Amino acid sequence: MEKEPLLSKQEFVVVIEWINTRWNNNTWSNNANVKRYYDDFKNFAPDTIWEAVNDLYDKGLKFAPTPSEVKSHCVRVSQSHAGEYERRLRQDIKGELPEGAKEGNRVGLERYLDGMGYESFWQAVYETGHKRYVNGTPDKNDGELYKQPWEEAKEWFLEGKKNSKFLTGIVGTEKE
């Protein structure tokens, strides 16, 4: 099942018109190209795209950015906001959290983990530590703990967390 686009075609046309009024002689002005470009941008939130094109415009570029440059900048904007613009537009997480903070926290955390592609809270913890290790910025207590990729470390890492009371009130226990 394909996700419903976050960006409407009408909104995309407005973005293209905005680009065309600020830069001339660009690939965005060809209608056939615009139809193809929409597929590249439809899964970005409008706020992500507007922030990206405004950032590129504020750089004072003499020539219009290419679609790939805009898409690349959209990815950076989305990542810098941890995908918040996109997540808040997903139909299944719109609205206020239900009453009952603990259950709301659990549901919110599950949605966050799912949105970021993690299977569990402990995978998110490990992947964050592994990123620090790979980037050469481990915490002072990390040592070599996060050296292996998740696929290799999953079994021994989860074994150490089995029956742990740390955060189980919020995240629950790891499913076997």
Image (cartoon, rainbow, N blue to C red):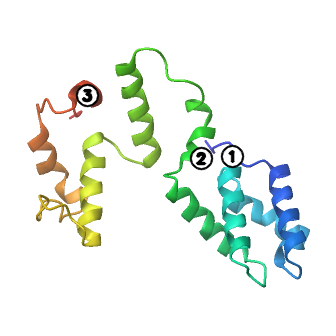
Q: Which mark is residue 32?
A: none
Question: How far across and down, in percent of the image, does residue 109 sit?
Answer: 39, 34
Task: Answer above or below: position of 106 versus 69.
Answer: above
Q: Earlier in the sequence, mark 1 or mark 2?
A: 1
Disc 3 element: loop
User: Mark 1 belongs to which amino acid?
Assistant: Leu
Question: For mark 1, what is the residue?
Answer: 6
Q: CA distance from mark 3 to mark 2?
A: 26 Å
Q: Do callouts 3 and 2 mark residues in contact (Cβ within 8 Å)? A: no
Disc 2 element: helix
Question: How far across and down, in percent of the image, does residue 72 sit?
Answer: 60, 70
Q: Do callouts 1 and 2 mark residues in contact (Cβ within 8 Å)? A: yes
User: Mark 3 belongs to which amino acid?
Assistant: Gly
Q: Callout 2 environment at 10 Å: few (<14), some (14 to 19), or many (20+)?
A: some
Q: Residue at x 22, y 34 (%)?
A: 174
Question: For mark 2, what is the residue?
Answer: 86
User: Mark 2 belongs to which amino acid?
Assistant: Glu
Q: CA distance from mark 1 to mark 2?
A: 7 Å
Question: For mark 3, what is the residue?
Answer: 172
Q: CA distance from mark 3 to mark 1?
A: 32 Å
Disc 1 element: loop
Q: Residue at x 52, y 53 (%)?
A: 81
